[in-house]
Every structure is written in structure tokens, then in C-alpha cells.
Image (cartoon, rainbow, N blue to C red):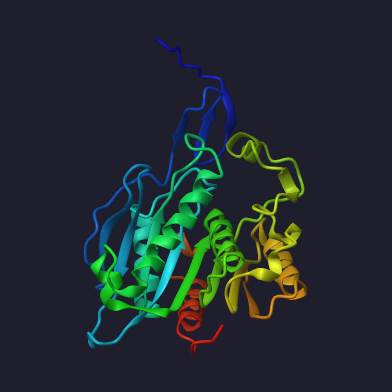
Amino acid sequence: MEQRSDEVAIEFPFFRIYKDGRIDRFAGEEIIPPSPDSTTAVRSKDVVITPGTGLSARLFLPQIPDPTRKLPLLVYFHGGAFCIGTPFSHTYTSHVASVAAEANAVVLSVHYRRAPEHPLPAAYDDAWEAGLWALAHSDRDGPEVWLNRHVDFDKVFVGGDSAGGTLAHYVVLRAGIDGIKVLGLVLFHPFFGNDRRDRLLEIIFPSSSGSVDPRLNPGCDRNLGRLGCGRVLVFVAEKDFLKDRGVAYYEALKKSGWSGHVEIVESEGVDHVFHLFSPKCEQAQALFKKAASFLNQAQAHL
């Protein structure tokens, strides 16, 4: 019988990783069932994308007074340092329902495999697979009826917060390299690494080349100009320790030769992903309205 080790490899406020690979998660694990949201009336249901790996998602559908109207689609990736968080939690169910209602958009919130049980790049692989699965409904005969019936596949967006923003960028860049175009990319306080040694990444992403790995730091990526969308919106927060990398991404994208339009919005006086925990505050409401406006701008032909 294999003996468990209680020796800690790394500890964060929300989780602890032991040297034998086990993890204790202290937050982001609460699960609630899909149901109509009591505040927004957005409906949700859970879908399985790849049974073999457990890749799944929670799908959100806003109220649709006109059943003939097709809505934008946002493929969304949650944050949590690649280790915690799930679309099935109260935090993300509430957050994504608010986005769906404010933007009047269908949202596919993806449950990717998490580290350290599934070291990176497993989450990158899942993110890409989920994006392809969503786009496969564009001929209206995919496995999920809400996507077949209600999505305008000329208005597909990809987005995410923190580590989920890293995954969202990866999906849209890989799409561009592969000749696939989506309409836009929206990043909420994205994690794009740092210049210091990162013990967590050494554990959960052993194949990474560190601070110059383009999967973590897009500013180092010579393919950045091939991003597969026409518009990008980057949110940063004034007190966020990740703010500088978000700003650097904005600047690098402008200089990359990419032909689209990028905008950056800074929320003053707040910290990393504040909108998840204080969704009713003034800055969060402004963030939601800006994101909704971005998702509803007139279609750009790519």
C-alpha cells in the first residue's frame, strides 16, 4: 500500500500541494446544480464534451423574447491558478449568469482538467478541445440543442479570468494559426506569468520553459500577430499584482503586426478578480457593462 506524505511542497491561501502530488483545496470547490438564476432568470445546464477525460461545461442561456433571434456565444474559462475553481461553483455560476444576462449572450463555461493531478498543458488541451466542440455546432446539427438553436456563429467570443485568461488567449492564438477566426477575445485580469522564479509553475507545468514560455507569457511569442480575432478587450485592476503583465500584453499586441483593435480598461482602487467577490460594487457593474458592450458591438468581418 502506497504511503501518503504530509510534506508540503507549496502552500497558498486557497490550496496546498503536497510533495506526493496530493492537493487540499480550501476554496472554489462548492458545487451547486444548474437552474434558472433567481436574479437574472438565466437558465443553465451541464454538458459533457469528452467523457473520457471528464471535459465538461455549464451552459448558460439568457431570456429570449424572440426565438428567431440568434445570440453571441462566449466560450469562457475560469481562473484559479490552474488548480482551483469550477464552473459548477456558486461563484462562477453567479458570475457567468450575470455576464450572460448583461450581454444577452449564450455562455459556455468550461470545466477543464486541473493541476496538479493533471499537470499543464492538460488544461490548454482541454480549452482547445472545448473551443472546437463549440464551433462544431455551426452547421446546426451538433450534440447540444441550445447551441444549435440560439447561437450566431458569426459572433463567437472567447474569454476568461486570471489563469482562464491565459487559456483564452491560447485558444484564440491557436485558432489564428490554424486558420480559424472568431470575433473577439475578452480577458479579465489575465495571468501571463512573471519574471521571477515561480515555484507553483515549476510543480504544475514541468515542461514549461519558465518566464519566456509563450504559453504563459504571450509577449515572448513570435506568433502573437497571428491572433485569430479582430477585437480584444483587456481588463486590469489598479492593485492587482498581475496588472503589469496585462498592460504588457496590450502593448505587445499593438506592436505585433496584428491587424485588429485592442482596448485596455483599468478598474481603480481594486484588486485581482474583485468582480467575482464584490459583483454589486460600482466598479464591477461598470466592468460588466463594458464587457457586454464589447460582446454586442457590430460584427467585424475577418
Q: How many marks?
A: 0
Name the residue: 51% across, 35% down: 116
Q: Quadrant of residue 260?
A: bottom right
Comparing 244 with 271, the one in front is 244
Does residue 7 appear in this view? yes
Residue 227: quarter of image: bottom right
- Residue at left 51%, top 19%? 6
- Determine whether 199 is above or below 82 in the image: above
Q: Residue at x 74, y 48 (%)?
A: 211
Quarter of the image where one finds residue 241 = bottom right
- Whether residue 48 sits left or right of residue 228 in the image: it is left
286 lies above or below 111: below
Residue 134 is situated, as x and y percent measured from the top left of the image, at: 38, 65
Q: Nearer the viewer, residue 225 or 277?
A: 225
Relative height, residue 206 to residue 56 (above, below):
above
Q: Residue furthest top?
A: 1
Q: Is residue 185 left or right of residue 44?
A: right
Task: Give residue 236's position: percent from left, percent from top.
Answer: 62, 67
- Residue 275 pos. (x, y %): 48, 65
Q: Is residue 160 left or right of residue 259?
A: left
Q: Position of residue 240 (x, y in %)?
A: 64, 59
Considering the image in quadrants, where does the C terminus appear?
bottom right
Q: Is residue 39 visible?
A: no
Q: Quadrant of the N terminus?
A: top left
Closer-to-camera residue (68/217) = 68
Q: Is residue 217 above or below residue 96?
A: above
